[in-house]
């Protein structure tokens, strides 16, 4: 992680994303028998590709800013919290 969890001064953004995990424990977690059965039920057997990685993980830090991504938009919108 590009920040120090013990040093709030290093938390320069309210959210960071840790990216694409393709190590075996993550791939195995995304490819359990029960998940494969669920995927088959949702989209049909043979109609999906087994995951070879896990997407990004958002990590939130205490902040006076609220991060919100509106539906249909890919860019987060920052707005100040009212307290």
Image (cartoon, rainbow, N blue to C red):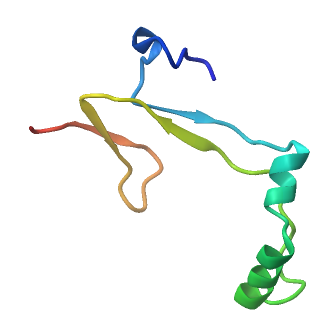
Residue 74 is left or right of residue 77, and the answer is: right
Residue 79 position by quadrant: top left
Residue at point 43%, 61% (across, down): 72
Residue 74 in view: yes
In the displayed structure image, the side of residue 37 where residue 1 appears, left or right: left
Q: Residue at x 74, y 42 (%)?
A: 20
Q: Is residue 64 above or below residue 73?
A: above
Residue closest to the far left: 83
Is residue 52 visible in the rendered image? The answer is no
Residue 59 percent coordinates (x, y) = 51, 36
Residue 43, quarter of the rendered image: bottom right
Q: Is residue 42 above or below residue 32?
A: below
Residue 48: where, in percent of width, then height? Answer: 83, 76
For residue 58, above or below residue 37:
above
Q: Give the mark count.
A: 0
Relative to 38, is 74 on the left or the right?
Answer: left
Question: Dividing the image into 4 quarters, which one contains the C terminus?
Answer: top left
**Residue found at x 86% / y 70%:** 49
Q: Horizontal and vertical percent for residue 39? A: 76, 80
The N terminus lies in which quarter of the figure? top right
What's the residue at 30%, 28% (across, down)? 63
User: Residue 30: horizontal and vertical position, in percent?
Assistant: 79, 61
């Amino acid at each position: 992680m590009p920040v120090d969890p013990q040093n709030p001064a290093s938390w320069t953004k309210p959210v960071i994303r840790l990216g694409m995990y393709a190590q075996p424990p993550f791939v195995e977690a995304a490819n359990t028998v029960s998940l494969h059965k669920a995927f088959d039920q949702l989209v049909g057997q043979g109609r999906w590709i087994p995951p070879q990685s896990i997407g990004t993980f958002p990590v939130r830090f205490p902040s006076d800013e609220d991060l919100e991504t509106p539906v249909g938009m890919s860019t987060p919108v920052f707005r100040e919290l009212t307290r």
